[in-house]
Image (cartoon, coloured by chain):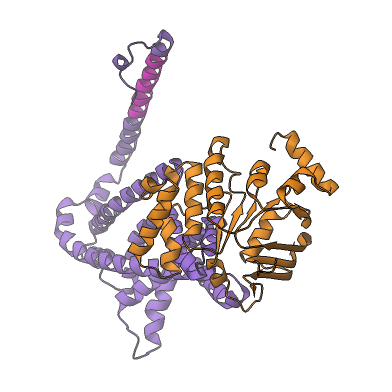
């Protein structure tokens, strides 16, 4: 970080002393941080290992051999989660953008559209995802409409999309409203229509600003995809559950959980990176 | 003047809630004329410009562009705005578009000009104002003066009948004001019709054909710059100019 002292041979004594002091402080801080981390982990680890039930928990939850055995089943389930995730993510983006645009329409003519969009977000942000999954997964087939599917994967995806597009719509709306009105004024004064102004000027700037928040919602959705298992879809969670029911050993849950974490790590790092880039851009003084 | 003015305001009034911002304003801008609006902050200069561009709807009176009543609600504002170029105090360039895309946006999206044709014309305009080598840059890489010149070029790209300039040098560092004013003077020499709100009295005196003094939303006094700035009739105008002179800006 700091340039080597040789690069500035004429550094004053005051500056040399300041740098030496800062180096000393930095060493001390990293020592303290490292030591406290090690001690903390050691204490927690010892407490778990020394607990009276540890041997039993270990064999029930952390049976490595059995874990490998169920891995193919769980992985097959995870592949379903992944497909559901990608399709839902795309649908959520589109639906969220449409609802956010509807909610930001101006003028009394669009009151019904705005009202419906607001009601949508209120309803689907408010309702717990599990309840919505039950209502759609069991309620819709109950209607016995011939043209509506009874496939639990499709119905589960629909419930996910309904819930998450309500969240994402609000993220987009915040982005749209963060674009300064002078940008609209400039676009309209050039003769662009409302729609052209939204598409060419407002939305591109809005989407850039909310990228980190969108990725955060994506990471959250990644694990909520596992909830479609409650409808009976054989995803990673369900595959683990089936194995647990057969063996009365909980290791498959741990395997599924670890796989979800592995799935989330790349997205989380991507989110961090996008956020960092957004901050750097703002500090550079523009949204270019 | 016998010919139809490019812009004519007739009894224009504008209110924001209980506050009357413009009252009974009559004003006309003839072709190739430069008309300067002066007055304190809050006197209604910007609102007048926004009304002329239909960014605000008037509460009374009529505004005509080339004789056509543009305050008629049956008129499509988007079509009217294509004929008017606006430059804002804070430039309002689009930060996510390059300078070139800022300039070509309206011709391509609004007038349906092809990209290559629009870019050729934009490059010619940018060259004229000395910004050709900045064409691919994003606005935040430009100085304030360069941004404002780019914004002027953007307003010119649609071949407007009328240019509205809203205190376009107010946000600039003093040493950058000159380059922007030089460009406005060139535009006048090329015959552009301009209505501008300004705090640069010296510039108004040199460039404007007519100076209008606004006070509390009323157009108190208008005439040639030598008369309005040199021998104002209205006491309010004298007061305003005295304050300006005191601040060393005339």
Corner quadrant of residue B163: bottom right
Q: Residue at point 63% right, 44% down? A: B203
Which residue is nearer to you in this view: A109 or A155? A109
Dominant secondary-structure state across the stretch colored magenta: helix
Q: Quadrant of the N terminus of chain B?
A: bottom right
- Above or below A251: residue B244: above
Q: Quadrant of the C terminus of chain B?
A: top right
> Does any portion of residue A164 appear in the rendered image?
no
User: Could you say where residue B205 lies in the image, as x and y percent from the top left?
Assistant: 67, 45
Q: Tell me if residue B188 is in the magenta stretch.
A: no
Chain that the image shows in orange: B
Q: What range of the chain is rendered magenta? A: A18-35
- Above or below A28: residue B247: below
Q: Tell me if residue A20 is in the magenta stretch.
A: yes
Question: Which residue in the rendered view is the most extreme toward the right?
Answer: B235
Question: Which residue in the rendered view is the most extreme toward the top?
Answer: A13
From the image, state the color of chain A.
purple
Residue B98 left/right relative to B40: left
User: Could you say where residue A109 lies in the image, as x and y percent from the top left?
Assistant: 60, 77
> Does any portion of residue B126 appear in the rendered image?
yes
Q: How many marks?
A: 0
Question: Which residue in the rendered view is the most extreme toward the front?
Answer: B2
Q: Residue at point 40% right, 42% down? A: A280
User: Could you say where residue B59 lies in the image, as x and y percent from the top left?
Assistant: 73, 69
- Above or below A145: residue A100: above
Residue B177 left/right relative to B99: right
User: Could you say where residue B53 lies in the image, as x and y percent from the top left?
Assistant: 61, 64
């Amino acid at each position: 970080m700091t340039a080597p002292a040789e690069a500035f041979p004429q550094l004053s004594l005051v500056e040399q002393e300041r740098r030496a002091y800062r180096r000393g402080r930095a060493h001390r801080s990293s020592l303290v941080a490292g030591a406290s981390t090690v001690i903390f982990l050691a204490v927690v680890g010892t407490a778990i290992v020394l607990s009276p039930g540890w041997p039993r928990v270990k064999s029930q939850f952390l049976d490595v051999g059995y874990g490998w055995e169920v891995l193919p089943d769980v992985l097959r389930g995870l592949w379903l989660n992944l497909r559901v995730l990608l399709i839902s993510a795309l649908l959520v983006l589109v639906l969220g953008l449409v609802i956010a645009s509807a909610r930001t329409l101006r003028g009394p003519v669009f009151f019904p559209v705005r009202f419906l969009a607001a009601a949508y977000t209120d309803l689907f942000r408010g309702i717990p995802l599990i309840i919505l999954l039950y209502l759609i997964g069991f309620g819709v087939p109950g209607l016995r409409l011939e043209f509506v599917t009874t496939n639990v994967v499709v119905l589960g995806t629909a419930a996910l999309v309904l819930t998450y597009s309500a969240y994402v719509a609000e993220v987009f709306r915040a982005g749209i409203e963060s674009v300064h009105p002078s940008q609209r004024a400039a676009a309209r004064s050039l003769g662009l229509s409302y729609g052209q102004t939204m598409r060419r000027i407002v939305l591109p700037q809005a989407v850039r600003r909310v990228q980190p928040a969108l990725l955060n919602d994506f990471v959250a959705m990644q694990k909520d995809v596992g909830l479609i298992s409650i409808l009976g879809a054989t995803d990673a969670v369900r595959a683990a559950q089936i194995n647990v029911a057969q063996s009365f050993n909980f290791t498959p849950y741990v395997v599924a959980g670890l796989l979800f974490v592995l799935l989330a790590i790349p997205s989380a790092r991507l989110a961090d990176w996008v956020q960092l880039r957004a901050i750097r851009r703002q500090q550079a003084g523009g949204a270019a | 003047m016998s010919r139809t003015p490019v812009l004519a305001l007739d009894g224009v009034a504008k209110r924001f809630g209980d506050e009357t911002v413009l009252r009974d304003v009559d004003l006309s801008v003839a072709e190739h004329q430069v008309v300067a609006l002066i007055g304190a902050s809050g006197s209604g200069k910007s609102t007048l410009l926004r009304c002329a561009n239909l960014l605000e709807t008037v509460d009374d009176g009529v505004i005509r562009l080339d004789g056509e009543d543009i305050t008629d609600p049956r008129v499509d504002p988007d079509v009217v705005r294509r004929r008017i170029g606006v430059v804002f105090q804070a430039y309002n360039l689009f930060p996510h578009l390059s300078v070139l895309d800022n300039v070509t946006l309206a011709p391509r999206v609004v007038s349906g000009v092809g990209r290559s044709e629009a870019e050729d014309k934009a490059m010619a305009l940018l060259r004229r104002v000395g910004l050709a080598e900045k064409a691919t840059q994003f606005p935040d890489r430009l100085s304030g003066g360069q941004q404002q010149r780019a914004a002027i070029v953007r307003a010119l790209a649609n071949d407007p009948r009328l240019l509205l300039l809203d205190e376009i040098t107010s946000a600039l560092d003093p040493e950058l004001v000159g380059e922007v004013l030089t460009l406005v003077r060139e535009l006048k020499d090329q015959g552009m019709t301009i209505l501008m709100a300004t705090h640069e009295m010296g510039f108004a005196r040199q460039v404007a054909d007519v100076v209008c003094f606004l006070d509390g939303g009323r157009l108190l006094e208008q005439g040639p710059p030598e008369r309005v700035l040199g021998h104002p009739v209205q006491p309010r105008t004298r007061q305003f100019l005295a304050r300006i002179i005191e601040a060393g800006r005339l």
